[in-house]
Amino acid sequence: MRVIGLNAAGAIKAVMSGLVITFVGALISGVGSIFNPGTMVGLALMILLTSLAFNAMMFLLMVRVEDPLVPRAMFGILNTLLFFPSGSVYPTQAFPKWLQYISVIDPFTFAVHGFKSLLLKETGLVAIWQDMLYLAVFAVVALAVAVPLFKRTL
């Protein structure tokens, strides 16, 4: 249960900051679709699932690490490596084949697609259900693998 509690606490912090950043960013950039109730629900779900997926991924990667500096360094490197093939800067169709394969399993790709669809294309939940499903499955699988690896000592 401690593993679930740690991930839930991280997800709560991520959701709170994600909501603030999303709304402030949308207001600054002039994205008016954010006030649509369907978009608000979709954004809240995407922020929740994205935070759960990334918390679970980081927990899985760091479950056995003892040095407190390693997670910071690892997250910085992973953030850069996973952000580039996500399609946020360049369309994934323009990537070489090997990078397209990475983008297919990259959780950032699904988060970016979902947020772009909701905020820029003004679509609804129907257009992003696959992104939400992938992020949810990714979070569950990462937690399922991490739980047996978690140290049960003080």
Image: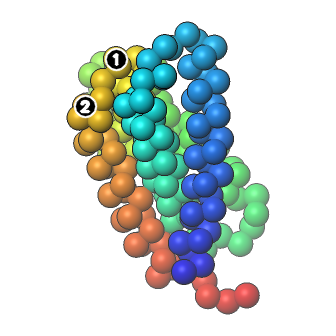
Binning the other alpha carbons within 10 Å of mark 1 as few (below 14), some (14 to 19) or many (20 upward) gives few
Q: CA distance from mark 2 to mark 1?
A: 10 Å
From the top left corner, tell me how far across and down residue 20 is, in percent. 64, 34
**Extreme-front residue of the structure:** 37
Whichever of labels 2 and 1 marks the residue nearer the N terminus, that label is: 1
Q: Please name whichever residue, 139 or 76, is drawn nearer the observer in this view of the structure.
A: 139
Q: Please name whichever residue, 32 or 63, is drawn nearer the observer in this view of the structure.
A: 32
In the rendered structure, the answer to whether residue 63 lies left or right of residue 118 reads right
What residue is drawn where x is 43% and y is 44%? Answer: 45
Q: Please name whichever residue, 153 or 13, is drawn nearer the observer in this view of the structure.
A: 13
Q: Please name whichever residue, 41 or 75, is drawn nearer the observer in this view of the structure.
A: 41
Q: Indicate how the structure is coloured in the image.
A: rainbow
Q: Are marks 2 and 1 in contact (CB under 8 Å)?
A: yes
From the top left corner, tell me how far across and down residue 94 is, in percent. 30, 19
Task: Say which residue label 2 marks.
Answer: 127
Task: Say which residue label 1 marks.
Answer: 121
From the top left corner, tell me how far across and down residue 31 is, in percent. 50, 14
Q: Is residue 137 above or below residue 116?
A: below
Q: Quadrant of residue 137?
A: bottom left
SS for callout 2: helix
What residue is drawn where x is 51% and y is 65%? Answer: 60
Q: The C terminus appears in which quarter of the rendering? A: bottom right
SS for callout 1: loop
Report whether residue 92 is seen. Answer: no
What residue is drawn where x is 57% and y is 64%? Answer: 7
Q: Is residue 9 above or below residue 73?
A: below
Rendered image: mark on residue 145: none
Q: Is residue 101 above or below residue 24?
A: below
In the rendered structure, the answer to whether residue 45 lies left or right of residue 10 reads left
**Disc 1 residue type (three-letter):** Lys
**Disc 2 residue type (three-letter):** Ala
